[in-house]
Amino acid sequence: MARHRITVVLSQAQGKHPVKRSLEEAIVAALIMEPGIEVSVVPHLYDLGPDHTGRLFLGSVRGDMVVLSWLFPRAAFWVLDRDGIKGQWGETQLKPPSADDDEDEAGEPAPAKGIGALDVPDRHIYCLDLRDFNQYQPYVDEIRRIAEACKARAEAKHAKAPAIVELGMNFRNGDQDTPVAEASGSSTFAPDQLLAQPGRRWYPVIDYSRCTNCMECIDFCLFGVYGVDEHERLTVENQDNCKKGCPACSRVCPEQAIMFPDFKTPAIAGAPIGAIGNLKIDLTKLFGGAEKDPLAQAVEERDRELVADGRQAVGTSVGLPKRQENKETKPKDDLDNLIDALDALEL
Ligand code: SF4
Ligand code: SF4
């Protein structure tokens, strides 16, 4: 059996923040000589266009991968999925200190009821949030643990089905020619191209573990961002049509499945549902009176963009979700109230 390797990709912060750069460099320096781990650095994941070398490199990685970025793990995972870089969700044990304190209050995240991703290969992608710790050591320790877990999983698979592993399997596109343990080397990509800084982008990212394909976002968005793919699934078809800085449709989605990873409000940027729960008590105590109706806010934001485009504001007359129709009869649950409180904060 080939020696097992995992690929670690560090996605840089936007800009040149010295403290962030120093953490990034410390993590890379600590891992660079680590056996069984290949480390690469790419610019901010969310900004990578389809032709960027960093995106091409990520797409070339076969086998298990750890991605460190300045994004919520859920957002990073679904940005990658959006770019065709797919895998099973890798559960990490790295929790920010505040999450440990509140673990009991957070409870279990709600079970996923979305339509799920398509064509997911049998490899794992672990996403770690670089905002959780300002020291490199917790990240390095967790990556070592993940590397061991991946190795054990590969060995178990080998013991179960030696013929398949010896033949090898490329997890992408059904190609069966490349051994499981081989990660594509970043050495084939020129470092200056890998790190070429892309312009900033703004588009919605869909969490298909939550999206139920209800199509309310298509009805609401009047800028042609959303469409339906060949499987009749909601897709972000024209992502660059989205209006920079506007998160309107994320407030309309009844499942909180639409993320804008660079938005300031955690609930919209992709905070895990458990983490939103963690914030519940403090926020409602501190800001309980500041609640705004998210649908009214979304309508306001959409109208602003329509007018900026030289079009007419439509108010509540177009594309308001069924949720709005039921609004008077269906009381908000705790999660709705919390999302509203978070939205109102605009942290
Ligand atoms: S509104 Fe939300 S749940 Fe419905 S299709 Fe759009 S993303 Fe999916
Ligand atoms: S934020 Fe606005 S423009 Fe962008 S997809 Fe949502 S509704 Fe459409």
Image: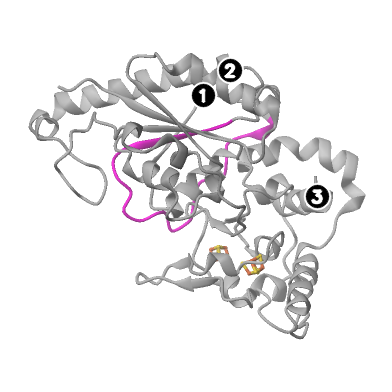
Residue 136: image tag: 2
Looking at the picture, how far across and down is residue 257, in whole percent? 57, 56
Residue under numbered circle 1:
93
Q: Is residue 169 above or below residue 341?
A: above
Q: Residues within 10 Å of mark 2 (few under 14, many from 20)?
A: some
Q: CA distance from mark 1 to mark 2?
A: 15 Å
Q: Secondary structure at mark 3?
A: loop
Q: CA distance from mark 3 to mark 1?
A: 29 Å
- In magenta, the rendered stretch is 105-129
Q: Residues within 10 Å of mark 3 (few under 14, many from 20)?
A: few
Please report the residue visible at 73 percent of the width from the left and 49 percent of the height from the top.
334
Q: Secondary structure at mark 2?
A: loop
Q: Amino acid at mark 3?
A: Glu
First in residue order: circle 3 vs circle 2: 2
Residue 346: image tag: 3
First in residue order: circle 1 vs circle 2: 1
